Image (spheres, grey):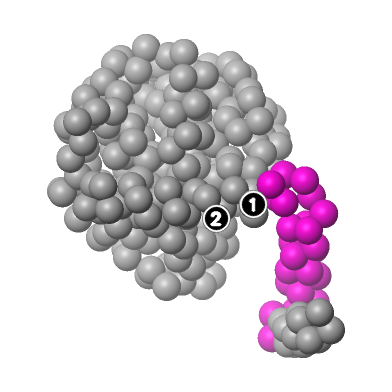
Amino acid sequence: MASRLQQSTLKLVNLARTQGLQTALQHATNAIAWHVVPSRREFARNLVQESELARKFDQLHGVDTAGESPLTDVGVPPEKAARGNGLYRGIWPRLFHAALRESRLPLERFTFVDYGSGKGKALMLASAYAFRRIVGMEFAPGLHEVAVRNLRGYRSPQQRCFTMDAVCADALDWEPPAEPLLCFFFNPFDDPTMERVITRVARSWRHAPRDIYLLYVNVRDVREQARVFERHSALTLVGRSRHSLLTKVTAGR
C-alpha cells in the first residue's frame, strides 16, 4: 500500500511539473472519485464482466471491438484527445438494448447515426433493429479502419438492417443526413464539444425540419453530462433513466 501511494504521489508531482498544477489536481480528483463515488465504484466492478462479454462477442462474430485504447494511440493528436474523453471503449450491449427499448420510438422510421462510433460496436448492435440505415462517424483514423473491417465481416442471425456505413470525420464539421435521425452518443465528447455538436445538429434541423432524436448513454450515470442536453435551448427532454437520456430537437439556433 505504501509503495502504491508513493508511486501515485511521484506520478502527480511529475504531472504537475510537465502539464501544470491544474491538470495534476484534476487527475487526483478523478482518481479519488473511482474509490468514493458509488456509480464509479459499481462501474469498476462491472467492467471485468463486461470485458469478458466483449471478448465473447468478438469471437462469436469474428470482429475486433474489445479492450480499451487511448485516443492518442489511434491517430488523434494529444491536444484533441481530451475532446473525445481520451479513451476508446465499446458500448455494453445490455445498456444499448435497454436504451433503445426505453426510447419507445418507431425505429424503422429512422436512420441511426452513432457519433464517435469507434470500432463499430454500436453499429453492429443497431443492425438487430429495422432502421432505415446505419451510419457511424468516427474521428480517430485507427478506430475507423477497424470499424470498416468489422462491418465488412459482421454477420448475425438477428440482423435486420444491412445498410451500414462508417465515415471518418470530425463531428464539428460533419453534416448530419437530411432525413429522420436517431443520433446516438455513447459518452463520446467533453462538455464544450458536445454543446457544439448539439448546436450543429439543431442547425441541420432548422435547414431541413424533420424528426431528430438524441440518445445519450453513459455506463456510469447520465448525470455526468445530462446538464449539457437539458440546458440546450434546441432540445426537449423526452425520457431519462440512470444510463440513458433521450431528447428531441424542437428548435434551431
Magenta segment boundaries in residue numbering:
18-42
Quarter of the image with the N terminus is bottom right
Left/right placement of residue 222 relative to residue 126 reads right
Residue 67, percent from left and from top:
43, 61
The amino acid on which the numbered mark 1 sits, given as a three-letter code, is Arg
Along the line of sight, which residue is nearer the eye, 70 or 19? Answer: 70
Which residue in the protein does label 1 denote? 45
Identify the image quadrant of residue 65: bottom left
* Residue occupying image coordinates x 58% and y 30%: 244
Identify the image quadrant of residue 178: top left
Secondary structure mainly formed by the magenta segment = helix
Element marked by disc 1: helix
Residue 225, percent from left and from top:
66, 40
Give yes or no for contact between labels 2 and 1 (Cβ–Cβ under 8 Å).
yes
| Residue 11, magenta (yes or no) | no
The amino acid on which the numbered mark 2 sits, given as a three-letter code, is Val
Which residue in the protein does label 2 denote? 48
Left/right placement of residue 172 relative to residue 234 reads left
* Residue occupying image coordinates x 84% and y 84%: 2
* Residue occupying image coordinates x 70% and y 37%: 223
Residue 153, percent from left and from top:
15, 49
Q: Is residue 253 above or below residue 123?
A: above
Identify the image quadrant of residue 31: bottom right
